[in-house]
Image (cartoon, coloured by chain):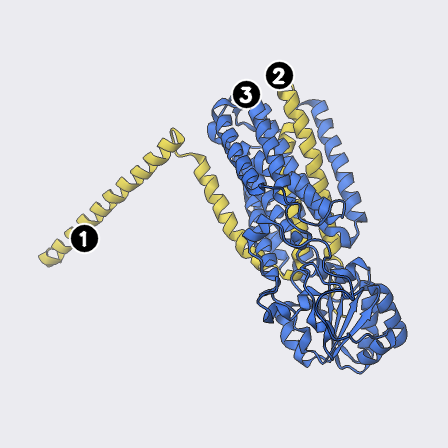
Amino acid sequence: MATEVDPQLLEKIRAAAQAARQAADTAQLYAEQVAAGAAAASGGAIDPFIFRLAIFALAVIVGYYVVWAVTPSLHTPLMSVTNAISSVIVVGALLSAGIDSSLGENSGTARFFGFLALTLASVNIFGGFLVTERMLSMFKKKG
Amino acid sequence: MLNGNIAALLYLIAGVLFILALRGLSSPETARQGNRFGVIGMAIAAATTLLYQLPSGFSSFLWVVLAVGIGGSIGVWRARTIQMTEMPQLVALFHALVGLAAVFVAGSALYGPQAFGIGVPNNIHGSTLFEMSLGAAIGAITFTGSVIAFLKLDGRMTGNPILLPNRHAINIGLAILLAVFIFAFIPTEAHFVFWLIVLVSFALGVLLIIPIGGADMPVVISMLNSYSGWAAAAVGFTLANLALIITGALVGSSGAILSYVMCKGMNRSFISVILGGFGGEIAGPPPGEGDVERPPVKQGSAEEAAKILLAAKKVIVVPGYGMAVAQAQHALREMADILKSKGIDVKYAIHPVAGRMPGHMNVLLAEANVPYDEVFELEEINPEFTSADVAFVIGANDVTNPAAKTDSSSPIYGMPILDVENAKDVLFVKRGLGSGYAGVENELFFRNNTTMLFGDAKKMVDSIVKALG
């Protein structure tokens, strides 16, 4: 049966395959150029920075939609809770407050800044979440 | 202890929980659940960090406990004792703390990069140094800017715009200087240049906020909210931490949207707010003065007001910041309760900029046990004024001024207002005839169907409650 296939059809398939290969080659070329550009910019392999930038851009978009969905009556709690969560900067403070002071001459300074940052961020975390909770508990329905 | 990939995944989970925390705020019913998601996210992020890299040695561990202990107790104490009227000040201070923490974390990343795995001293990657200086700069601007905002909101500094000569030139000069320092810092990694960046940013933060007047504070506080987010995001890039990057992006866009909402509520462009110079403390001539001949206003007593209210079927209360200053919200709710017990329909109408920060008035009413389903936003309630018998305006002025619609020469022209003029009767509780923040006279005061109730808002409402009794 296979031998009875219309030669014209075969020709068409071959042409389509050819076009696809060409397209793939072009795409490959473009990708290589982009990669080369990225590599030139980052001095080697594609920088993980690009990956982080993607996460960042997507989070901005998610934030845009989520915040527009917040009811205006809760805009004050929104602000206090964003305050609390932006104190996730505490992850940096924790790392530097716990640094090994034998690592170098400046590690004591690093640890001191970490200690200050950790104190400030802790005020915000505890204060922010608690005051948000306090406000939200006031919002009651009729009756 | 923890594998790096697992730690990154846990940070991602924390970031997602933060998104859910904001998502919860779409309705008061889900909001507390959302707040708990936020707490869980924070706990995951902190625990992941501690497990990923345990504090080295017992003394380090003690430092961590000490810092969390001190900071945590201050936070708990402030959260428990703060008055709801002082919420804007507290939020401004919290912004300041985030900003300063960003500066310190960037600083400690510079002095001890090994702790973050971003290199060794004097050999930190150029892009990391760029992100670090950006985080420190935005953090420093947020810090001093928020401190100024706090001082203005707290009345420790004049709410009037402080306009330096050539301030735009000074600001542009500082911004250029900042850029120069950042580009000098990247190839040299010089510590003193880092501190110069911080110093210039501190100055810039002060200079950006002092020219902005009291009336624009709701925009300023939202804007600083946004800045604190971008600072956190920049530090997140420095430390390659996903939780921090996601949160920074969320907070940054949240603050930007709130700024936009507030600007729209005042019909002000964001640029003109930033440039400053608009609106001071209560301005305008005291009662009786002014150059235009005006018909006398109709002045009423608490008893007359009570009579008008009792004759009504539908009352819309329009509270403004003056009500909160006089602490009249509890008396107001008492008044509403009496009216409701007599079968009168009572609703509250909130202007977007009714308080001193976004949503402030809603919190103040909620604190006075006003159910949230009786409180409506401008767009929802405006069509209802035509069917209302009484609009009870207390401590608000500019947000009811019809000049915003009719007088194109008025400074508040174009601002969305609450259409209290459409109600059959308007009761104005006010201290005097003085004009509001914008310094514009309100022609409503002189209309036939308006009754002015002069006096302290709380005392006046107390007397009305007595007269209703």
Q: Quadrant of the N terminus of chain B?
A: top right
- Residue B333 appears at what percent x and percent y? 81, 68
Q: What element carries label 3?
A: loop
- Residue B462 appears at what percent x and percent y? 87, 68
Please state which amino acid type lies under the numbered disc 3. Answer: Pro
Q: Mark 3 points at which residue?
A: B121
Cα–Cα gap, marks 3 and 1: 58 Å
Image position of B300 with respect to B213: above or below: below
Q: Nearer the viewer, residue B158 or B260?
A: B158
Q: Residue B311 carries which label?
A: none
Chain A appears in which tint? yellow
- Does residue B155 appear to the left or right of B41 in the view shown? right
Crowding near pointer 2: few (<14 within 10 Å), some, many (20+)?
A: few
Chain coloured blue: B
Please state which amino acid type lies under the numbered disc 2. Answer: Glu
Q: Which of B10 and A120 is in front in this view?
A: A120
- Residue B217 appears at what percent x and percent y? 66, 52
Chain letter, disc 2 residue: A
Q: Mark 1 points at which residue?
A: A16
Q: Mark 2 points at which residue?
A: A105
